[in-house]
Image (spheres, helix red, strand yellow):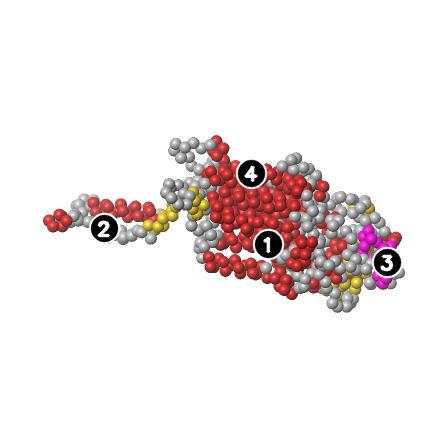
Amino acid sequence: MRYVSAVPRGSELQVFRWALTRRLPESKPLPTPKSRAAAKSGAPKPRASKSGAATPVRAATKTRAAGTARANKPLPARANSPARANNPALVGAPAVLAAMPLLVVALRAVATRGFWFWGDQALIDIEARDSLLGRNLLGVYDRYGWHHLGPLWLLLLGVSRWLGGGSPEAVIFGSCALQAVAAAAIVVVAARLRPGLTGWWAALVLLGCEWSLGLDRLGTVWAPYSIALPAALFVLLIAYVVVSPRPWAATVAAAVCGTFLLQTDISTGVLVVVLALATPLLRLVTRARRRTGTGAGRRWSVQPGWGWSAGNWRLGGAGLVLMLGVLWLPPGIEQLTTSPSNVVQVFRFLSTHPADQSFESSLNAAGTVFGSFPLRTGERSGKRDADPNWLIGKHIWDRPWFFAYILLTIGAAALAVLRRQRQALALAATSCIAIIAAGWSFDLIYGPLYPYLVFWTGALVTPAWVASWLALAPAPRPVPGRRVSALLGLAAERRWARFAVPVATLAAAGAVSAAFVIYPFPLSGVTSLLGRRSWQAVSADVLAPRVRTLYIDLGSADAMPEAASIADQAMERGRRVEVNRAALYFFDPSFAPTAKAQLKVLVCCGEHDPGQPPHGLWFSGRVGGQLIYTSAPPGGARPSGPSQFRQPAVRYAKVVGHLVNNSPGHQPDELGLAVGQSADRPAEDRDPVRHGPPIGRPSLQVDPLVKT
């Protein structure tokens, strides 16, 4: 059996044929058929000449053997052949360049050292540790009293944290490494869709998106920023599932990526669900063809293998079910062992809190976000990620980028149909659906439309640009007698393009990496200082030999950043930490108060300062506008109330706040914090919805949606 394949250059159709052949040993001459007349007359057999020249029979034998050897010799790999696409050198180089800025950030975090987590980053560090130990079965907390669906992102961070000895640098390294893997995977999948320069083009566009996201987002360990690149990867994986002749491996990869998105941030649910439902329909449409015959019957037919029956579908289906079962096992256990479960709480919230975004404001926000990619336009950092006015400040007709990308993908799909490019059609249609689903998710957000909630959707322009490349380049080889349009001729993979696109990608990777080295690291500034000062205010009391269990009372939701920093450092030093039940939704059930604590810490009360110290507590310090009290007397000194230290809340006025332990023997350091600056509390902590009414000070009131 000999396998013969014909792959025309520039065409997406591949013809496969199996031919029966028989190879004979070259030393054995082929039998010569005799005619009936020659057989009857007894004609002698031909012999070799004296000069050594081959007889006609031997000459025919050698000719036929040479032809057989040429037929069995593998064809040289062309630039657009699948063998060329699988070349690790051609695919690995652009993948490494696309991931290089993120690897630079990861290595820079390890080299910088001295990070102190505060706020959401401290909670993520705690949850990553507890997820790896099996104590946390859910994702990060949400400001409305429930958690996101699963701990997959936290588990991956926990592995990196464990390998790094529990240091904050290891957590930052793990976050950047995950995003680097997503960037490299985007390039690899794009190259699988079309060999040649597609991987280089995808890397070039992706570097522009990384520049748009900026170091202050990519270098911050936070769920809303960590889903941007995996979302773009999910769109490309769905397109590969649509066109792959053996779709099971790509289906499992897409299921893992979609699970990561859903468990990390529930706002990706619209994108994941819509694309999952559209995948069978797209696979059917891309394999439909029109019958050209004039006979009766159907005018359209579907090519065989449009479903998932190709290959070993039993093994593929079992692998998919097993993978989804393992990834969703922790949330499933929580669902069965907790009442009310997290899924019930999410359903109650979504069913009782409908979105109140207007259609116009959603379009305005989509125009702002998509206009920032793949190159920065407007705001060049994350300083205004908690400013809804910046997101919806301009009308959609002033920034019509959302509609522009929809039209771009529709045009790419139409051109792909005309050129019969199945890969281009699949990716263009998938990108169009993804962009529309992202715009729809804007309208479903409850509460203020903060930029940090939706900025991840801008990374979806990467598949759109790759789809445009697939629709335009490479142009098919000109057919004799048929003209090729000038547009397609310019887009073809000319000799100059084979050097220009890789060189541009290399230059962009160097420029973005250099900018990420020069730019200030987002977690090494004021947030790190606030985390260190919070711990310094109570470290002497917490590290006392008699203290084994620490109870932290959060007087209001405003107190979470300082309390989380104290809890993170105390757990790192072997102390058990418990919190008041009204604040449990920030943490996980393992923090429920069950034992008698040797030390109590109260973080209170911001703008709700009662003006006098609580009974039995001593003032330890003021950090970021919050007062910190402990139950341990400071060396026998008399209790000092907060009235002499009272100042306006940090978020509402420009103040000079004491960010150090104010107990006797310490000199306070001062740091100016201004309203609206990133040097104030971070964007996620300036959220008035999350930090509105207190959790229940002085009398604790538990929200009905909060687990107790």
Q: Which residue is label 2 attached to?
A: 30
Earlier residue among tags 4 and 2: 2
How far apart are the alpha carbons under marks 1 and 3?
A: 46 Å
Image spot of residue 108 (x, y percent): 64, 49
Secondary element under disc 3, as helix, strand or loop, is: loop
Number of the front mark, 4 or 1? 4
Image spot of residue 624 (x, y percent): 78, 51
Q: Which residue is label 4 attached to?
A: 408
Magenta region includes residue 614? yes
Asked whether residue 600 is in view, the answer is yes
Earlier residue among tags 1 and 2: 2
Mark 4: give few (<14), some (14-19) or many (20+) Cα within 10 Å: some
Tell me the tag on residue 613.
3
What residue is rendered at 59% in x and 49% in y?
271
Number of the front mark, 1 or 2? 1
Q: Which residue is label 1 attached to?
A: 260
- Compare residues 693 and 676 and report the one nearer the observer: 693
Please give the range of residues in magenta. 604-620
- Compare residues 147 and 466 and report the one nearer the observer: 147
How far apart are the alpha carbons under marks 4 and 3?
A: 63 Å
Q: Quadrant of residue 331?
A: bottom right
Earlier residue among tags 1 and 3: 1
How far apart are the alpha carbons under marks 4 and 1?
A: 28 Å
How far apart are the alpha carbons under marks 1 and 2?
A: 64 Å
Q: In which quarter of the image is residue 340?
A: bottom right
How far apart are the alpha carbons under marks 4 and 2?
A: 62 Å
Magenta region includes residue 124? no
Circles 3 and 2 in contact, beta carbons < 8 Å: no
Q: Given the image, on which type of amino acid does mark 2 rest? A: Leu
Circles 4 and 3 in contact, beta carbons < 8 Å: no
Earlier residue among tags 3 and 2: 2
Earlier residue among tags 4 and 3: 4
